[in-house]
Amino acid sequence: MDDTDSRRGGCTTWVLTELLSLARETGVDLLGEPRLVRLNPNIPWKTRGNGALAAHFGVGSGPGRTVGSIGGRPVRSYARGRPLSPLRAERFREAAWQRVLERSERGSAGTDPAMVAAERPLPTELYWQAVREVVPVGSTLNALRRAGAWWRTDGDPRGLIGASAAIAWPARRVTWELTAYRTEPRIGLRRVVDADSVRTVAAAHPSLFLCEDPRTRRILVSPHTNCPVLYGLRSTRPGPLLRARSSVRSEPVDRWVLFRTNQGTGDHLVSRSPRDLGPFRAARFAATVASPPEVRRGGHVALHVVDEAGGRVECVAFEPTKTLPRVAQQLAPGDRVQLWGSRGDDPVVRLEGIRLVRLVPRAGRRRSLRCPECGTTAGSLGSSKGYRCPACHRRFPPEASRRPRLEPPLRLGDYHPTPSARRHLAPRGPEP
C-alpha cells in the first residue's frame, strides 16, 4: 500500500499495522517481516519519507516468532506457509482495502490511498524504477495487468507505483527498523522519549545506526510531525532491535512492529554521467575538481568539477549537511573525487556524499625567515628580490621563505552528511 498519509499527519506504516491486526482477527497469518520500502527521495509530490509498505499473507507452518505487538497481543510471523484459498484471499483483500480507506488521511490534499495484491512477487524492475526514476503511472498499470495483479485506488492512482514497488523489492540489501507507536490520546502532544536511554541502547548494540547526531546531541529516533510514530530504531540486524526495545524509556507504547527495510542501502544511486542525470534523479560519478570552491551565502559551498567525459558540472554541498561543505571547501583544482547526489528541476547536483580518491599536494604558506648564522629575522629586498639579514648582511633567494610542500589535512575516503541531515536511503557511513 502507499499514499495513506498527508503532510499534516497519519502514517502508512501505522495503517499496515491495522492490516496486521485485521489478519489476526480473520485467522490469516503473516509470512516473513512486513516491508518498509523507501522510494526515490527526490520526487516533488512525496509526503515526508516517501515510503511504501507491503506484507506477505497466507497460512503459516512451522514455528512462528514475534515481530510485533498490537493491543497487548503478539504479532506472529512464519518463515514458511502456503497461499490462501482463492475465496479466502478475495475476502481478505476486500476487507483490507476497506480498512486502508478507514485509516487513511482521506480528504487531505495529496492523500490518495492505493493498494496492490499479487499471488507472486512482481518484476523487480518496478522497484528499481520507483527508487531511481520518475515513473509514469501508466507503465505501472501495464505491468500490473501483465502480472494478473489486483489493485484499488481512491483518487489519483499514483500510489500504485509505490505499492507495486514494495512488493517487487528484491530485498538483497536490507536493514531493519523497529517502529513503536503512540496511544491515540497522545497523538499531537509532545513526545516523551528518554534521550539517555536511547544513547545507552545504541552503545550496547553497535548494529544500531542513526540514533543520535553526535555534533548536536540530538536524538534522531523520533519524528517531529503530527503522526502516530513514537520512535523508530534502525539496525543492520533484527535481533538487537528486539532486545533494545525494552530498554528505551518513553511514554506508553500502543503497538510496535519490526520492519525489513531498504533504508541505508543507497539503492537510489546509479553510476552514470551527471550530464545524463535528469530532473529528480540521483547519480554517483567520478570527477576532477576544476576550480577553487566557492563559499556562498548561508555557508553552502559550490564545487565545479569535470566528469570523466570532460563535462563541467556544478555541485553544491549544503550547510545543513555540515561535513560536506567543510570537506568541499578544502578541495583544490586537480583533486580526484567520487561524488554522489541528486537533482531537482535545475541541473545543479545536490551533494549527498564525497569520496576523496587522490589529492594534489598543497604548497605551504610563507613564513618568517631567520638567518641560520645569527638567528636574526631577514628583511625583504622587494618583490621577487629575495631577503637579507640586517645583522650579518647574508642574502637569501625568494623561495627560501616558503614552507615545504604540505599534504592537505584531509584523509582519503568517504565523507557523509552529519546524521541528522542524512536521507532514509543514504548509504550508511560512520557517525562522526
Image (spheres, rainbow, N blue to C red):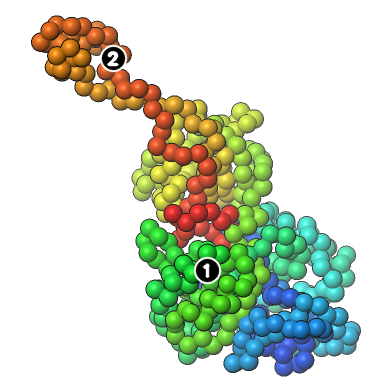
The spot of residue 319 in percent (x, y) is: 41, 50
Q: Which mark is residue 18?
A: none
- Corner quadrant of residue 5: bottom right
Q: Residue at x 66, y 83 (%)?
A: 66
Instruction: Please state which amino acid type lies under the numbered disc 2.
Output: Ala
Q: Nearer the viewer, mark 1 or mark 2?
A: 1
Q: Residue at x 53, y 32 (%)?
A: 358
In the displayed structure, 3 sits above or below 400; it is below
Instruction: Please state which amino acid type lies under the numbered disc 1.
Output: His
Residue closer to the observer: 372 or 279: 372
The spot of residue 25 in percent (x, y) is: 72, 93
Q: Are marks 1 and 2 in contact (CB under 8 Å)?
A: no
In the displayed structure, 297 sits above or below 240; it is above
Q: Quadrant of the N terminus?
A: bottom right
- Inspect this view and state whether residue 104 appears: no
In the displayed structure, 130 sits above or below 322; it is below
- Corner quadrant of residue 24: bottom right
The spot of residue 260 in percent (x, y) is: 66, 70
- Name the residue tied to disc 2: 400
Label located before the other in sequence (1 or 2): 1
Q: Is residue 403 left or right of residue 380?
A: right
Secondary structure at badge 2 equals: helix
- Name the residue tied to disc 1: 205
Q: Is residue 227 left or right of residue 285?
A: left
Q: CA distance from mark 1 to mark 2?
A: 55 Å
Residue farthest toward the left in the current orientation of the protein: 391
